[in-house]
Structure formats: structure tokens, C-alpha cells
Image (cartoon, grey):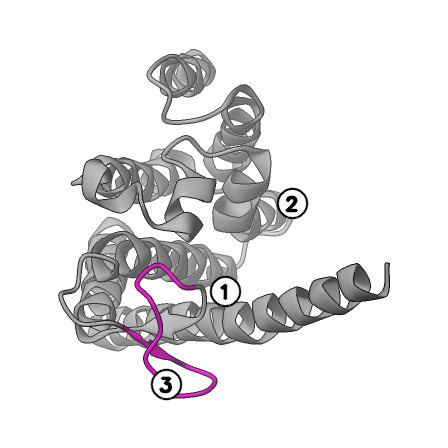
């Protein structure tokens, strides 16, 4: 029954263009792995991330269309984006299934909190009235630029991580210390992702420009 629900959820996500076909397949495999390791509690926690991130992707989407970064990603996610957001959680699920250990529960929660924080920051931060600041150069850059942060985006990141931490703590019966750890590591993970995006995206753009000039 659960397997059928996961398959139906993945298929429905593809039908309503929340996921591309490859993303729907990846979501099914991710859901199966999480269910195998953490049962319905793990699936619910991942579901909170997926549903809120999908809603925010469509929230004021018309206002976001002119922003290159978000326009390239689009609202429908492919297998690579599903793997990036849920891959660690899926691995934690398989690891917990093979060798149960409380550490895998916190790995699950932190990975989802980080993904939720990053998604909320991207989808809401781009709506900030002020231009964001590059986390690498500390200069103002256009909204939608990879590796940039804003006040609104940072607040959204914290809220996204806190939501997962609170729900995870409730589902798995954990205390305040556990919730605080998941929250802080979730926010930190999102910030590191932003930093890597700033460094590697700029470097790749520079290498591409040099290659084009030489050829």
C-alpha cells in the first residue's frame, strides 16, 4: 500500500508538472529508500519539504520569470535536482535500514532541513526589494544571482530549516537540543551551498569566457 502511494505521489507530481519525468522516477526511488529506513515518519518529513518547496516555486512565479537563474531551473525539477535535495536523505534511509542507528535520523533531518532552507531562501529571497549581496565579493548583484544573499532570503532560510527541525523533533520524539542542532546545521548547510554556488559558478563562467575568446 505504501509503495503504491509513493508511486502515485511521484506520478501525480509529474502529471502536475511539479517534477519532470526523470525527477518523478528519482522521487519514487528516494521515497522508497526513506520509507525503508524511517517508515512513514521519514516520508512525512520529506513530504513537508517537497510540498512547501513546490508551493513556493509557483508563488509569484510571474514575477520570477525574468530572472535568469530561476527561469533556467523552472518549477518542475529533474532527477539531478531531486538527487541534490533528497540524495543524502535516501542514503541515510538505506543506511538506517541496513544498520539502524540514531545518527541516521539526524542525518535525515539535517539534509532535509538544509534543502528546505536553501529552497525557501531561493524562492523567497528573490522577491526582496533590495538587491542581494554576493557572499563571495560582498557587492550588490542582481536578484536571482547564484551565490547571493539578502535579508529576506536569510530569514526565509532560517524559517525553512526551523520548520523541518520542529516537525522532525516531534515525529521522532527528540528534545530541544536535537531540534536546535538540526536547525543550525540546516541553515549552515544552506549557507555553504550558497558559498559554493558563488565560487564555482563564477569560476565556471570565467573559464567559459576564456575558452570562447581563445576559440
Q: Is residue 204 left or right of residue 45?
A: right
Classify 10 Å Cα crowding around label 3: few (below 14), some (14-19), many (20 and above): few
Is residue 161 found inside the magenta-colored segment of the image? no
Which residue: 78% across, 65% down? 213
Per the rendering, the mark at residue 139 is: 3
Which one is nearer the viewer's eye here, 44 or 131?
131
What is the quadrant of the C terminus in the image? Answer: bottom right
Instruction: Work out whether 42 lies above or below 24.
Output: below
Q: Position of residue 13 (x, y in %)?
A: 37, 21
Q: Is residue 134 magenta?
A: yes
Q: Which mark is residue 215?
A: none
First in sequence: mark 1 vs mark 3: 1
Q: Residue at x 41, y 30 (%)?
A: 76
Q: Is residue 64 left or right of residue 189?
A: left
Q: Residue 203's spot in the image, x, y percent?
A: 65, 73
Tell me the SS state at disc 3.
loop
* Horizontal and vertical percent position of residue 134: 40, 79
First to last magenta residue range: 132-145
Q: Say if 81 sits above or below 174 in the image.
A: above
Q: Nearer the viewer, residue 112 or 15?
A: 15
- The residue under label 2 is 98
Q: Which residue is mark 1?
A: 103
Q: Quadrant of the rendered structure where residue 211 is?
A: bottom right
Q: Nearer the viewer, residue 90 or 63?
A: 63
Amino acid at each position: 500500500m505504501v509503495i503504491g502511494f509513493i508511486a502515485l505521489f511521484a506520478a501525480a507530481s509529474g502529471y502536475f508538472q511539479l517534477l519532470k519525468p526523470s525527477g518523478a522516477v528519482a522521487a519514487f526511488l528516494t521515497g522508497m529508500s526513506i520509507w525503508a529506513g524511517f517508515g512513514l515518519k521519514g516520508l512525512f518529513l520529506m513530504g513537508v519539504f517537497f510540498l512547501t518547496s513546490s508551493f513556493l516555486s509557483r508563488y509569484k512565479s510571474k514575477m520570477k520569470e525574468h530572472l535568469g537563474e530561476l527561469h533556467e531551473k523552472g518549477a518542475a525539477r529533474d532527477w539531478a535536482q531531486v538527487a541534490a535535495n533528497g540524495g543524502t536523505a535516501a542514503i541515510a534511509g538505506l543506511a538506517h535500514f541496513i544498520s539502524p542507528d540514531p545518527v541516521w535520523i539526524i542525518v535525515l533531518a539535517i539534509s532535509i532541513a538544509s534543502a528546505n532552507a536553501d529552497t525557501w531562501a531561493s524562492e523567497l529571497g528573490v522577491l526582496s526589494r533590495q538587491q542581494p549581496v554576493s557572499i563571495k565579493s560582498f557587492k550588490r548583484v542582481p536578484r536571482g544571482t547564484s551565490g547571493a544573499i539578502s535579508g529576506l532570503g536569510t530569514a526565509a532560510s532560517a524559517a525553512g530549516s526551523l520548520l523541518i527541525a520542529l516537525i522532525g523533533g516531534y515525529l521522532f520524539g527528540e528534545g530541544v537540543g536535537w531540534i536546535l542542532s538540526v536547525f543550525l546545521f540546516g541553515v549552515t548547510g544552506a549557507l555553504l551551498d550558497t558559498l559554493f554556488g558563488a565560487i564555482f559558478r563564477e569560476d565556471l563562467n570565467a573559464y567559459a569566457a576564456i575558452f570562447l575568446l581563445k576559440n
